[in-house]
Image (tube, rainbow, N blue to C red):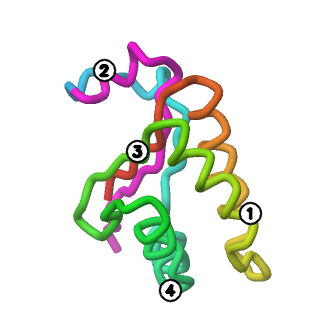
Amino acid sequence: MIWKKRYILTPKTVEIANKLDQDLASSEELIEIVLTEDDYNGLEKLGFFSFLNDLVNVNIDDYEDEVIVGDDHIRKVLSSIDSFDKANKQKSLLNEIRELFREALIRKTGVYFYF
């Protein structure tokens, strides 16, 4: 079975974020999570993407590219993600996603969703 690659990633610098916007960034310049179909479907079923959409007014969805940028939005996600139900098999993946948001805050970049 062929599955669609889905990425959640954070550029390592602001300059790399600019390169990413022009589709010029290499994978070595990014901190990324590659979601399997099971990962994506599990997060979707949990309502995680809807949770993020409502929280910071974005549109993360299948066949959509989206980015969460700005210290306020990133801090909001970080302060709220722990309240999201993690008592399931997605806990490890949610921890990885939280780390991407922490890196984005430290690096002054953003978290990009390529679905």
Few, some or many residues within 10 Å of mark 4 (<14, 14–19, 20+): few
Q: Which mark is residue 18?
A: 2
Judged by depth in the image, the label closer to the viewer, 2 or 4, is 2
Q: CA distance from mark 1 to mark 3?
A: 19 Å
Give the percent coordinates (x, y) of residue 51: 51, 73
- Residue type at mark 1: give it: Ser
Q: Earlier in the sequence, mark 2 or mark 4?
A: 2
| Disc 4: which residue | 45
Q: Earlier in the sequence, mark 1 or mark 3?
A: 1
- Residue type at mark 4: give it: Lys
| Disc 3: which residue | 112
Q: Quadrant of residue 53?
A: bottom left
Farthest residue, direction bottom: 45
SS for tag 4? Answer: helix
Few, some or many residues within 10 Å of mark 1 (<14, 14–19, 20+): few
- Residue type at mark 3: give it: Tyr
Give the percent coordinates (x, y) of residue 17: 37, 24
